[in-house]
Amino acid sequence: MSAYEAVIGLETHIQINTTTKIFCTCKADSWNDPPNTNICPVCTGLPGVLPVLNGRVVEKAALLAAAMQADVQPVSYFDRKNYFYPDLPKGYQISQYDQPLAQGGCMDVPMPDGQVRRVSIHKLHIEEDAGKTINENGQRLIDFNRCGVPLIEMVTGPDLRSAEEAAQYLIRLRQLLRWLGVSEADMEKGHLRADANVSIRLQGVDYLNPKTEIKNVNSIVSLRDAINAEIDRQVKQVESGGQIEAWTLDWDDNTGVLRKMRSKETEADYRYFRDPDLLPVHIDENLLERITADMPELPLARRARFGQQYDLPEYDADILTGERSLSDYYEQAVHSYAADPKRVSNWVMNDVLRMINERSIAPDQLRLTPEYLAGIIKMVDAGTINTSTGKSLVEKVEDTGQAPTEIVEAEGLGKVSDEDAIREIIAGVIVSNPDQVASYKGGKTTIIGWFVGQVMKQSRGKADPQLTRTMLEELLSE
Amino acid sequence: MSNNQQKQPITPDLFDHLVTLASLELSQEESEYLRQQLNNQMKAIDELEAIPLSDETAITTHGVSYTPQITPAIRDDQWQACPNPEEILAQAPEVRDGYVVVPDIPHTDLE
Amino acid sequence: MELPDLPAHTLAYLIRRREISAMQALDAALERISAVDGRPGRLAPVDSSAEDAEKVHAFITLTPERARAQAEQVDRKISQGEDPGPLAGVPFTVKDIYCVQGTPSTAGSRILGNFVAPYTATPVSRLEAAGGLMLGKVNLDEFTYGSSNESSAFQPSPRNPWNLERVPGGSSGGSAAAVAAGEGALSLGTDTAGSIRQPAAFCGVVGMKPTYGRVSRYGLIAFGSSLDCPGPVASNVTDAALMLNVIAGPDSHDGTAANLAVPDFTKDLKKDIRGLRIGLSPDYFRITYIDPLTGEFDQQPISSEIESAVLSAAGYLAQMGADIVEDIPMPHTQYGVPVYFVISRVEAASNLHRYDGVKYGFRTPDRVADLPELYRKSRAEGFGIQPKLRILMGMYVSAAQYSKQYYNRALGVRTLIRNDFEQVFDPQGEHRLDALLTPTTPTTAFPMGDIYGDSVLMQYADQLTVPANHAGVPGISLPAGFAEDGLPIGVQLLGPDFSEARLLQIGRAFELASEGEEWRKRRPAILKTA
């Protein structure tokens, strides 16, 4: 492999999360629907129907384009891409060919080894999705539910150099899509699909060799595996004196095998021409301003800022900016706590995140608001409660929605630091457990932990553990 | 271009390619007839080449100019279900378990 | 006059006043149909019968039950004092290029021979909502490809009610023949290169192509998407205006339907036309074509009788106060047909991709090895020769290596054709016309079977009508007399964008001026023997 360099570009299809399809009023999301129930004359290509553009599709696509620093075109056109395929009811796909919605753009993708790969975007356009087919006993079964779902297609330049880089780009893209609210980007549901264009060349040259296209990759893991398999295949092919032909390949996840689908069709066969049923798409300055007015701070920028502003290690910043609502939560908690942000990050990354995952709640849906969390941490700082009480409070607040101070008072959870109170409990424990006392006095000093546990139990977790241990050592030595 | 090519730009080979592209199949007779007709019509179409057209001449995809005043409003993102999807499915020649059924497409495996 | 021969506006008036009922109007129409129409068109094999040559055969599918239910509703509304709509009780037919829910919607083709539409085209539902009674679907050239209706897969194809050995014209041949024979006072046709205006001229009725975008195309089985216009066929101008009122207007199902309020097209019909400038163009009195032998441009004048009819019509309009302006240049008229060949074929080939035997319509009954074979066989067996011709031409001129040369060039020449109209209609320009007066067709209706001959006049017959489709402007064909052979002659008015009201106004003035003429009293041959 060292003699060769892999050259990879990705073509991603992103399902936009509008309510309706791009050219008709059927739902955009029909993942759970029985086949051929989310259809209408338009998306099934019946005779006489016409496409009618959904304005929200244009807005979301323009937002993504702006976030990718692409040039949103003031005028773009729809073209028909003509070919025969059973999941394509009209016999053509309405897409954008030579005047797409946006051109250019880039994304700086951080790699695990600390490098940053700048991935250029060639273009971004909108189009309609096709239906789905299932193979069964030498027949194809067709479901048109997905026909007409709005897609953004984004094509990168051949800028990626390994399967891992391709995977990282896809990870960051998925993060951005969810961040902007443009797509749920769940690869298992096909919201985000990637085709990889793969070629190899000798190290050091700058021209491009013929490439193959890998389709039907359904997850980040499959993407890595498929690309690596293809790189290996191409290297073997070239080393044995063969040529690489521009095949389209299908990746079978179950068997881990690449299958040739068809020769990559040339564009001439699609006979693109302007769709006469649709007028040009106009995005003037005013509209673009309105669309980008709510552009949030983007994930990688926020990650960098958290690292700098809150002095967080990269790993922490990465987790805390994984999802937009989590990062908003964190930041609000930091403001409310108004002290060391790292302390907040520990609590969020451990207790809050665990609870979010276990209970499948979104951060902005938590009853444990960032202010309440800050409050809990402050109480622990002040010694009003101990740490383990604090952690259990996290769950209690979420369960009840009550303010932490209220719960502490209602349940009497305040840390017991009153020496007399503790002495009384210790006395009780000593009297009730003569064997363990004898054991301790006999030299098994480690059993003090057990004693501490007993005191904690008796005090329902409220006793100050440090103080308890000190006093136990004192009293047991008597 | 040879004189013959000028008169008959659509050769039998090119014609066959067009037929494949169009997912059609034709009898010998039909093929010859249609190929002749196409070549005849091409003579009329070739007239267009002689017309002086400057690069600045805009193309007209619709005769009428769609000014902002007459352009229809862009559609809102509101769901409106089709009242009778089952009637659409009922038009399919073969249906099974709610799916439209067709024969498969040939695939080739890589060695 | 018998009920079926009454103008639609008169019929609706009488029905609203309860002088007759909608059911009576319907019965009269159905009676007329059974008297004159003969058997409706059917898919081959069809045995010919001697009777065929004596009937009109406008229909493919009759829908008497549907019409009956509609008539009942109209009569009920009237008896309850509710508004039954402007077309209350008026029987109408629909060119079978429109989808109407629950009815076979065939496009005149075997490939949709068994297709029952699950939805209704917007213009049709508007006609029904206005109180109209749908008699059925009438015949057409297959997928509207043709000028004689003979290419329909549903035979026998319609005949001209004025002379049953002649074609009714096409592709809206069934529509024009039906109206001429009193089988429904109105018909909904489509005009892509003249396919409403030409059959209207051949059959002595009024046919209008509105401005592109004036009427929604939702439900119109597409041929040339940038050219297709739904439009009215009627026996007189007032009826055409009334029908246009009902079908025109924006539609949320059509992204190219202009967002323009619909004026009342009947309002200005009584206005006089004093001072209106109506032009005559020499480019419309001849057919310019490429001689297939020499490859050179050549010209043939149109029929002298038709020329006379146009000049005579100009005379009437002058009498009514219009200014007739001669020598109007429309220099790119001669390119209309070649440009049409390119643009329409590219759009048609693409529009016909969906007919693949998979989801509706005809699927080959033969055993097939795989899906590509299913496609090939279904399309080969389902399409007639005319659609195949257009598909292949469309493939050729739209393939990438050729498109710069043909398709884009054609779109550029289309601009020049459009410019011809913009220049002459420009209110600040040299000519400042309100309308152009031209012949509709170069000849009268030709004999059945002749269209596939070599006559240049037939190949280029669309030359006078197709420029309006390229430019998007509205046009109307008006009956203007008869030729020596007893066949109707039509004259055409063309106007600026969205000037239908003005064209109808001029048309009405012409009707009034020529009211007393003998030729207005003639009736089609079929009705004399019926």
Image: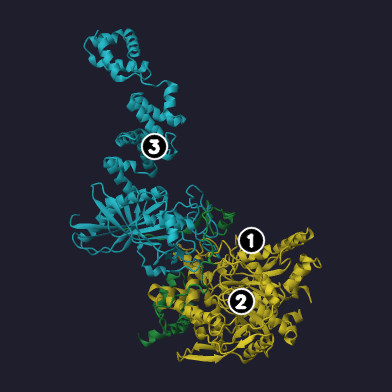
A223 lies above or below B6 = above
Q: Nearer the viewer, mark 2 or mark 3?
A: 3
The residue pinned by badge 2 equals C196
Q: Can you say whether A230 is above or below A350 in the image?
A: below
From mark 2 to mark 1, how far is it between C-alphas? Answer: 25 Å
Check disc 1 and report its element: helix, strand or loop. loop
Mark 3, secondary structure of its residue: helix
Q: Is residue C48 left or right of residue C392?
A: right
Badge 2: residue crowd in 10 Å (few <14, some 14–19, many ≥20): many
Q: Amino acid at mark 2?
A: Ile
Give the mark nearer the N terminus: 2 vs 1: 1
Q: Colour of chain A?
A: cyan
- Left or right of A159: which side holds C479? right
Kindly identify which chain the residue marked by label 3 belongs to. A
Q: Place residue C187 in its image quadrant.
A: bottom right
Residue C102, numbered circle: 1
Element marked by disc 2: loop
* Viewer-proximal residue among A373 and C33: A373
* Figure chain in green: B
Q: Nearer the viewer, mark 3 or mark 1?
A: 3
The residues bearing labels 2 and 3 have C-alpha atoms spaced at a distance of 67 Å
The residue beneath circle 3 is A357
Label 2 marks a residue whose chain is C
Residue at coordinates 62% horizontally, 64% vertically from top-left? C100
Instruction: Tell me whether the residue at label 2 lies in contact with that at label 3, contact meaning CB atoms closer than 8 angstroms.
Output: no
Residue situated in front as seen by the camera: A268 or B34? A268
Label 3 CA crowd tier, 10 Å (few <14, some 14–19, many 20+): few
In the rendered image, the quadrant that contains the N terminus of chain B is bottom left
**Badge count:** 3
Mark pair 3, 1: CA separation:
53 Å
Percent coordinates x, y for residue C263 in the rendering = 64, 69
Q: Is residue C460 visible?
A: yes
